[in-house]
Image (tube, rainbow, N blue to C red):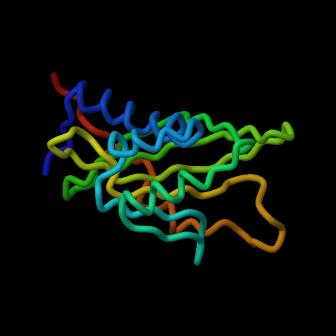
Amino acid sequence: MSRKLSAADVAEIHQTIALIAHVYDSRELDALPLIFTDDVEIELGYGEGVHLRGIDAARELFDQRQPDGADHQTVNTLILTDADGTVRTHSRYIALRSDGTTTNGDYLSVVVHTERGWRIAYFRSVLRYPLEPEAGPRPTAVTDEWRPTADRLPVIVD
């Protein structure tokens, strides 16, 4: 498969990833189809965590956001391509809580090109800091498939 993505593909993928925080924080539930495929798989955390499937489940999750919930910023999004053509994104997030404290983590996604444009088919959010003391070391197996290497960076074409 090709590692080639057009500049327009790259821009649209970045736009899709940026929409996550905007839609979640603003509870713009009608905009979820701009982000996710209908059969999206969502995981939150490590181990058991939360595991959901489908845009309706995503809508229920996003609708549970508290009015004073954290404000999220998505930063440093990488686009990676696998040998089989799978396109992944790895972003960092920073969240400012209403009490002034912060937290951060990683957004790990698999994006697919649909007739509606680039959408997230798989999304996982994992906490980096602060980790709970009883959580133990952060498992790296979760993020291994999203490690950047030179052979996984897309070739951008016109």
- Pick the front one: 1 or 122: 122
Q: Please, is residue 53 above or below residue 78 in the view? A: below
- In the picture, the quarter occupied by the C terminus is top left
The residue sitting at 25% across, 54% down in the picture is 86
- Pick the front one: 2 or 20: 20
The residue sitting at 46% across, 34% down in the picture is 18
Q: Please, is residue 2 above or below residue 54 in the view? A: above
- Residue 66: image location, x then y, percent: 69, 49
The residue sitting at 57% across, 50% down in the picture is 106
31 left or right of 7 in image: right
- Residue 107: image location, x then y, percent: 52, 50
Q: Please, is residue 17 above or below residue 52 in the view? A: above
The residue sitting at 44% across, 63% down in the picture is 57
- Residue 55: image location, x then y, percent: 37, 57
Numbered-mark total: 0
121 left or right of 138 in image: left
